[in-house]
Structures are given as structure tokens and as C-alpha cells.
Amino acid sequence: MSRFGNLEFGDAKSRPLKAGADGTPIRSAGYFLEQAERLYLAGDFELALRNYSRALEQNPAEYEGWFGQVRMLIELAEYEEALLWADKALELYPEHPDLLASKSVASSRSGRLEKAMAYTDNALSQKGGTPYVWLARAEVLLERGSATAAHCVSNAVAAGNAAPRVELEAGRTLLRAGHCGTALGYLRRAVSLLPGSALAWFELGRCQAALGFPETAMTLSQCLTLRPNWRPAREALDRFEQRGLLSRVQNFLRRPKRG
Amino acid sequence: MPGQTACFRCGSLLEAKAGTMEVHPPRAPAWKKPFRRVAHRLRHYRALRAAEGLARQSADRTAYALGRIGLPGPSRSADAPRWGELWLALRDAAVALALSIVPGLAHALRHQFGAISGYVLSWFVSLVMGLLFFGQALGTASMASAFVLHAWIAMDAVVATKRFKEKMTALQKIGWRLCGIGFLVILLYAAYNPIQRAAGFAVGNAGVAVPAQPVEVGDSILCRYLAEDVEPPPLKRGDLVLVRVREIYGEGEGQRGMGGNYVGEAVGQLIALPGDQVALTPKGFIVNGRALDVLKFAIPASLKGQSARLALGKDEYFVTMEWRIGGHGVVNVAGVAAMACIFLRPDVLARGVMRWSPIWRRAFLKEFE
């Protein structure tokens, strides 16, 4: 192995996994971060959190591990813990915009809108604004029903060079706020770029179900193919298939006209 | 870096000091989560109200941040004065309310019919059910649900207007919607009787059995109101008519057809018209010297076996129905009962056209003369 193998070039995702003599990957921080990312895209936030923790066990200086942990705590709706952990991460990486943005998201989701706005203001004022900062801003503004949120989402996508993850997050942010029509475009692109992500298929399915699209069943089935017996997806599919006559008529009327 | 076990540049092992840094985040106990969810929602409602004042400042800061990285910022619209905006919001709401006289029209014009189509369908079904079972408990319940749905659709049209949506918080929207629905339901309920009267139909319960129709006591009869400006009304002997019934004793005792207070409405059979000579015999009625068929002109149980002779005045109609007569202190029961069958023209409200209920016996009524 080259002695320069451990040099960092600023992109953790492109870092090749080291393999042992028997071909099995060495369980380094990079390995666990890859696993966490994979699990996140599969929608398994609990396991992803564990993998981020294991990555930090290997290397506590791994920023992605800290940030990932905070994000997963938010996904698991443990906002108080996310805030606490973000504060801890901020001790290591003071004034990091992503961590401040994650605090704003956790505050916003737990109903502390003023604090959320303060955190996102602080995050935006830092140098090196990332897509996550803009998405956090968008989420806080969407909570308040501000029209500026759409600019923040498009700005996030631009800042992330339309990366698949950013498209997915943008779609999720908009879907969360009930902007299903706008979210649909982002989620469709996310699915085309991340066809192996159960989370992307699930979010697209939810979006289509909200709009009453008949493709919902196919999308959610695809999600279940990627991650069988995933409860939220299974429930969403059941709900869609067991919808009553009224919902079907409603969906038919909602369906956009072709041509 | 405290707690680090490997060099973050080259990966070489450093002096391990296990336990110096905690890398496992704290976790929320599962039992706390539902309580937290409720707390978050309550906090969220409070925060949304407080956030209104901050919205403009934050929009400005966002605009500044967007501009800082060279992307086109949001246009700062020249906001109308506060009262002007409120006026526009109210105007939009009034237009939406007016359009919602036809349920779903306001939504359809805004291309939002899909969102309300289920409610419009339910309203239509309720309305049809209400008409089909008009005058019955099911019909009244269906009509009431149609009112509520109509009110809901109308208020949804109001709340969904763009300016209204922007002006109101989520809680205010719910409040407006509930108040609006309550108000509209009261309004529609108040309008129900005049609308029913204007439509010209009413449903009354038969107070007499007519074997030739056939009509039994208690059947619902659909009646058409008589036009007040058409005299004499187009009534024939044998018709079922809806009359306003007065109690026999009370104020004005002794006057024909002018007994006491009104006690309700009922459907009876018209036996004789103004100016006719009516004779009640144990075998049946004799009108103007002609004996009437007892199957077509039935004698109520309260008059069976009695005899009486009456001459009807100018505005008097002889309408039979079952009376509950105690006979307390009355010598001539048949005479009183026969007197009670005399109704003045203003008390004859409507002419029966259909046997309405039970629904499986629904049919138009026959004419005997």
C-alpha cells in the first residue's frame, strides 16, 4: 500500500476503502462512514447513526461522523438530543455552518422558530455556505410560509452542483412542508440519480400518493424491493391500495390532464 | 485533538486514551417521544403566531444572503398598506363565498376543484338523499349533512384564497373555518323553511285511511301548496289535503272551524266543498243527496256509527281525519267531531299529490271525482 494512501484530498466519499489481505475491507472510519451513508439512503437512520458513531470511535476527528450523528438524531425526531450533540460538535468545530444549520433544523422541527431563525442567520453569515445550510434556511422559511424558501432550495441545489443527495434532500424538505408539486421534480431526479436508494423511492412514493398519482403503488413496490418489509413503506403502500372509492374518484379528478 | 487514537493525516496510531471523549450521542427514551411530539406541536402553534412579526426581517436577511453569493434575490414587492391588504383579503373572501353558492365553483375557477371534489361529491349524494327522503328523518339528516358540507366547501374556498392564506395563521384559519361553517349552517337552517315553502312542497302524515288509494293512517303524503291568489282552489272531493289543525276546545269554542290554538298539521280527506250539504250516516257520507262510496270516502273511526247533518258555508271545507275525543262533558260527541272536520279556507294549506312513504309504496294519488 502506498504511504500516501492516507492523505486527504477533501473528498471523503471518493476515498477508496482499504482492503485486508483476504479482500475484506478494513473497518476504518471511512468504511463506517460509507456504511452509514448507504444505510441512510436505505432509510435506516438508526443503523446509520450507529455507523457514524463507530466511525467516530475509529477517528473522533472525522467531521462527517459528528455531522452525520446530528442529522440522524434529527431524522429520528430526537431534537433535544440533536441540539445537545450539535453543541458538542461545535466545541470541536466552532461556528461550522452545517452544524449551526442542523441546530436550526432541530429547533424548527421542535417548534422553536425564533431560535431556528437565529441559528440559520448565523449559519448563513459564516463563510463556506453548503447546500445543507440553504436547505436548513429553506426549511425554517417554509415553516413560516415564506415565498423566499423556493429561492433557498434552488440555491442549495446550485451550491451542491445538483448532486443526487442534495436533490433528494431538497425534495424531502419541500415534501415535508407540503409542497408536493415542487418536490416531485427534485425527487424524480433523485431517484434517477440514486436508483438504489430505498429512501429516494419512498419519498417519491409519498409525494405521488399525496398528489394521487396512480404510479404510487409501483414506486412504493420498488422501494419495498430494495428494502423488503420496511414498515413505513409497507404502511404507505397499504394505505394507498386500501383507499376508498371516494379517494379514488378524488385522485382521478386530481390527475393532471395529458396533452 | 483530545481523545484521538490515530493521526488524522497519516493514520498512524497515537497513544490511546480510551474514554477521554464520548462519541455516542444521548438517546431519547421511547416513552418520552409521544409527549415530546405533543409539546413540539403546541410550541409550533405558539411560535407561528410570534413569527409573523419576524417574517419581514428574515425575508430581508435571506435576500441579502442570496444576493451575497450573486444569485438573483427575491423581488421585494411594494407591499400595500396593512389596511389595504386586509381589505383585498376580505374582498377575495367575499367573492369566494358568493361563488360558493354553487358548491365547488370557486375552486373550479381557481383550478383547485380536485382538492374539494370529494366534498362536492358527498354534498351531491347528501342532497339527492335529502330529496329522495324529503320530510323524513333520514332526509332531514341528509339535508343537514348537505348544509354542513356546503358550508365547509364555501369556507374552504374562503380560506384557500391567496391573500387570506397569507394573512392568517394556521390556528386562525381553523377558527375562521369553524365560525364560518357554524354561521352558514345557521343561515341555511333559517332559510330552510322559506325555501321549502317557495319550492311549493310539504310532507304531512295521513290522519285518515282511504282503502281505495290505498292510504293508511301514518303514511307520509307529499303535498303541493295551494296558491293563495287562486280562488277557489283546485280541490275535488276525495282529495287528500294538508290542513292546519286546531284543538276543538279552547278560545273561540263553539265556532265552526275556529276552535282553539293550532296544534299542528295533518293530512285528511276532503269530503265536501263550500256550500255542500253533508250528512253523516252509519253507512257513510251523503253529500248533496248523493251517497259516497265508503272505500273511496272512508269514515274515520271517531265518526263511525254516528249521525249528523251539516250545511257548509262559503269558505268551509269538510275534511275527515281521526280525532282523539275524550267526550268529557260533551253530550253530542258526533256533532262535535263533525264540527271539528270543518276547516276554513286559510287552514287548508296543500293538496296531496303522492304517497311518499313508505318508499316501496311511493305512487301518485288517484282522483275520485
Image (spheres, rainbow, N blue to C red):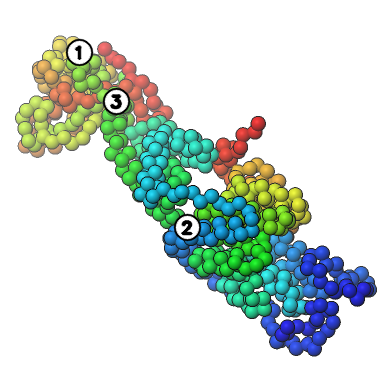
**Which percent across, then down, holds residue A60?**
73, 78
| Identity of the residue drawn at 45% across and 36% down | B106
Horizontal side of residue B190 vs A257, given as left or right: left
Does residue B117 appear in the picture of this structure?
no
Residue B291, label in figure: 1
Disc 3: which residue: B200
**Which percent across, then down, holds residue A81?**
59, 74
| Identity of the residue drawn at 75% across and 49% down | A192
Q: Are marks 3 and 1 in contact (CB under 8 Å)?
A: no
**Which percent across, then down, holds residue B237?**
23, 16
Residue type beneath disc 3: Gly
Pick the front one: B332 or A172? A172
Q: Chain of mark 2?
A: B
Tag 3 secondary structure: loop
Residue type beneath disc 1: Ala
- Measured Cα–Cα span from mark 3 to mark 2: 57 Å
Residue B53, label in figure: none
Residue B56, label in figure: 2
Asked which quadrant contains residue A67, the reply is bottom right
First of labels 2, 1 by sequence position: 2
Q: Chain of mark 1?
A: B
